[in-house]
Image (spheres, rainbow, N blue to C red):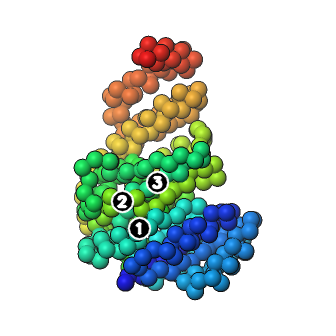
Amino acid sequence: MQRVDVVIPCYNYAHFLEECVASVLSQADVDVRVLILDDASPDNTPDIATVLEAQDKRVTCRRHEANRGHIATYNEGIEWARGDLFLLLSADDYLLPGALSRSSELMRSKPNVGFTFGNALIAEPDGTTRRLNPLGPNNVPQWQILSGSEFIRLSGATNIVPTPTAVVRTTLQKRVGGYRKELPHAGDMEMWLRLASHAGVGFINEDQAVYRRHASNMSLNYYAESILPDLQQRKAAFELLFLHRADILKEDETLRHFLAEDLGREALRLASMAFNNFDTAAAAGIQRFALEVYPEVRKSLPWIKLAFKQTIGPKCWHVLNSVGRRSAE
């Protein structure tokens, strides 16, 4: 059996930790080890982690005396890993049965694959669950192998990988290094792009993990101040990708142009969202970023639509939009 080292960073998630660890220890057909990294949680995480360590010799727990932040904690986990495969699993998420065996089987049979990912179930705060299908719900085989360039084009300006489903070949993870401290918001996306620039990517069309969506792990509302920094970090991720490019990306100006266009269009979509939330200043700033990244976005229909909305103002647009929706009903 392949060994899978699972690092569980935990900050203030004591109430989720036991379920998360149990979901790893119950995985069949793989040899698992678990490292709980408690980043100085103020809750009773140390008590829960200590009990879990005492109950199963496959579990080790470490506690930071002071909070180091998620990037440093992730990188500590990467340094610890020694197994064939590696997974970072947040303490508020958990694996579904068979997830690790499916990843292990694919990567054993496809040595050119550097990491795998799959579908995830999103547990919403209201108790409902929805499925996240990164490659779409239709006509996708059980396994799909993507070249690095194919994966990068498929991702574009967004992170399509549900993080709790991402199982990485440990030797490759060690080779490409840890998460970048200058990208606290786009670290996951940059890591998947970096890995894909060195190896193929496997997709598993199965529900691999459950991702909990709640107020303490992400904004459920609109926060304009976080949009532009996030976009800027995505731009930095692309710049780093080509700065430290592997052979498959050398001289690929077509891919560079594609990513710039996709980021510009995504920025314009978010600028429109900011305008719809009556935040005209944020909309204008994000719009300027879109133009900076991809000047040709000025010729697009979304740009023209946003310019019209800005001309008539948010209140007038809101009235017109409401009338249009009622007319369509």
15 left or right of 127 in image? right
Q: Residue at x 48, y 65 (%)?
A: 95
Name the residue furthest bottom.
57
Residue 237, placed above or below residue 321: below
Q: Quadrant of residue 220?
A: top right
At mark 3, the secondary structure is: strand
Q: Which mark is residue 99?
A: 1
Quarter of the picture holding the N terminus: bottom left
Q: Earlier in the sequence, mark 3 or mark 1?
A: 1
Q: Which mark is residue 121?
A: 3
Q: Residue at x 53, y 15 (%)?
A: 319
Amino acid type at circle 2 is Glu
The span from disc 2 to disc 1 (Cα, nearest Å) is: 8 Å
Q: Residue at x 74, y 65 (%)?
A: 43
Q: Residue at x 35, y 74 (%)?
A: 104
Q: Position of residue 11 (x, y in %)?
A: 66, 64
Q: Earlier in the sequence, mark 2 or mark 1?
A: 1
218 left or right of 85 in image? right
Residue at label 2? 206
The span from disc 3 to disc 1 (Cα, nearest Å) is: 13 Å
